[in-house]
Amino acid sequence: MSPLVILNGDLMPLFEARVPLNDRSFLFGDSLYEVVATRQGKPYFTTDHLERLRATAHGLHLPLPWDNGWFEQQIRTGIDALGAADTYVRIVVSRGSGDFNIDIDAADGQPLAAFIFKPAPVFPAAQWDTGVTLAVPETRRNSPKSLPPAFKTGNYLNNILCLYEAKQQGAEDALILDLEGHVTEATTSNFFMVRDGVLWTAPLSVGILDGITRKYFLQVAQQLNIPVQEALFTLEDVYQADEAFVSSTLKGAMPVHKVNDHVVGTGYGALTRTLNEAYWAYVDAHLDSY
């Protein structure tokens, strides 16, 4: 099933889509994005994703000329056109084209919006059975006082370098530390650990994405009366964990088996599995109806 694109309102095969070479996303990484997924053919938490998209746009001083209804219509059109059982939707908004000048005022004032639709990925069974392996790269998470990691932008070089270094160590993903050595997140996922029945995740202030899946896991944990700590912790704390997992829109909770050479559990831990099942039950009860 070939991926589709809606580019500034026009539906076409992915290979036919063209973006100008003077678009600022190509020249400077001056863009933002969101990923929406479907379950049972319906997207979920779309409003949350669009609110975060608008928050990022505001932080980048990038005015959006479209309302949420327009975004929702593009998403629905592409999902229907692709016809997959479940769909991965990537929304990309560029500041638009302009002169070869980083000044925001050099942009032409016409943002570009692209929606990419392809069948949702299927993760290897081994990742669910035994968990993923993470390694800590030498490259650190950029400071929230520079380009805030809370902004979901098209500038992903920090994460790209971290992932490369982790794979060079034989791992599947990176567990990134901040400049002071605190655990932040993985390259495209938030990170959780479980110690003595308590769920731990880094605070937003350390410089992580305000993950929508992360937010709902914390909400589900509260409903299940699972103690939660949003607090700073180190790699040594992770080595002492009973369970660990990464979370994202597409993964839900995927167990972590090993960090560097330290084994963390042997697949899904009991608390991780309980949280994951409760999370997907919540998703099923809140599928978008538009």
Image (tube, helix red, strand yellow):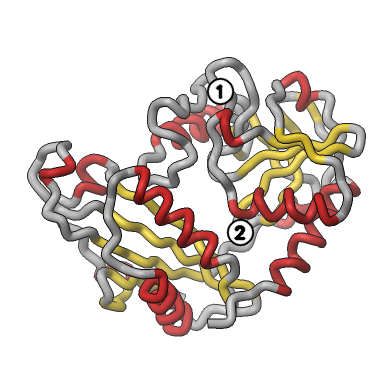
Give the quadrant of residue 173. top right
Residue picked out by circle 2: 250
Secondary structure found at label 1: loop
In the depicted view, which residue is nearer to us: 22 or 120?
Answer: 22
Q: Which of 84 and 281 is in front in this view?
A: 281
Horizontal side of 68 relative to 97 (left or right) equals right
Residue type (three-letter) at the residue carrying disc 2? Leu
Name which residue lies at 29% across and 76% down: 12
The residue lying furthest to the left in this view is 99
Residue 145 percent across, percent down from the top left: 42, 26
Closer-to-camera residue (44/18): 44
In the rendered image, which residue does mark 1 sit on? 178
Q: What element carries label 2?
A: loop
Tell me residue 158's x, y (percent).
43, 32
Q: Is residue 118 above or below residue 76?
A: above
Q: Decide: few, some or many residues near mark 2? Use Cα within 10 Å; few <14, some 14-19, many ≥20.
A: many
Q: Is residue 170 above or below residue 113?
A: above
Distance from Cα at disc 2 to Cα at disc 1: 25 Å
What amino acid type should be assigned to the residue bearing mark 1?
A: Asp
Q: How many marks?
A: 2
